[in-house]
Image (cartoon, helix red, strand yellow):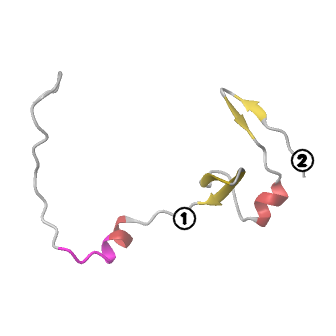
């Protein structure tokens, strides 16, 4: 299939036909990771983000919440 890159605001875009999106199970607002591989553009759907509960479920370390010193004020910071 031959497609054309078109201007979209200050960027450029490639419009994907519905049948391609359906076959790949992609929908509006899905996020893709875009990379180059030997001159080819490769797009992969990113994995869904884990919730905090999912991330913490496998955590086995001893976490101790504490404050840290970020150093002297460098500008107009309010203390």
Q: Residue furthest right?
A: 1
Please provide the residue range marked out in magenta: 56-61
Residue 57 counted in the magenta span:
yes
Tell me where residue 78 sits by quadrant: top left
* Occupied quadrant, residue 63: bottom left
Q: Position of residue 4 (x, y in %)?
A: 84, 39
Q: Distance between the residues labelled 2 and 1?
A: 29 Å
Is 76 displayed left or right of 10 in the figure?
A: left
* Mark in the foreground, 2 or 1: 2
Q: Residue 47 carries which label?
A: 1
Residue drawn at point x = 82 percent, y = 55 percent: 18
| Quarter of the figure with residue 58 | bottom left
As drawn, 50 above or below 9: below
60 and 2: which is toward the camera:
2
Q: Residue 56: x, y in percent?
A: 31, 71
Which residue was labeled with disc 2? 2
Q: Which of 69 and 9 is in front in this view?
A: 69
Q: Circle 2: is it few (<14), some (14-19), or many (20+) Cα within 10 Å? A: few
Does the magenta portion include 46?
no
Q: Is there CB contact under 8 Å for labels 2 and 1?
A: no
Q: In this view, does 11 lie to the left or right of 71?
A: right
Marks 2 and 1, the one that precedes in the sequence:
2
| Crowd band around label 1 with a 10 angstrom C-alpha radius: few (<14), some (14–19), many (20+) | few
Foreground: 5 or 52? 5
Q: In terms of secondary structure, where does tag 1 sit? A: loop
């Amino acid at each position: 299939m031959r497609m054309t890159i078109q201007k979209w605001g200050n960027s450029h875009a490639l419009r994907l036909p519905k049948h391609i999106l359906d076959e790949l199970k992609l929908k509006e607002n899905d996020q893709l990771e875009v990379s180059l591989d030997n001159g080819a553009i490769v797009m992969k759907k990113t994995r869904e983000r884990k919730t905090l509960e999912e991330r913490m479920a496998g955590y086995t370390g001893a976490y101790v919440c504490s404050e840290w010193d970020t150093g002297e004020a460098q500008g107009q910071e309010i203390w």
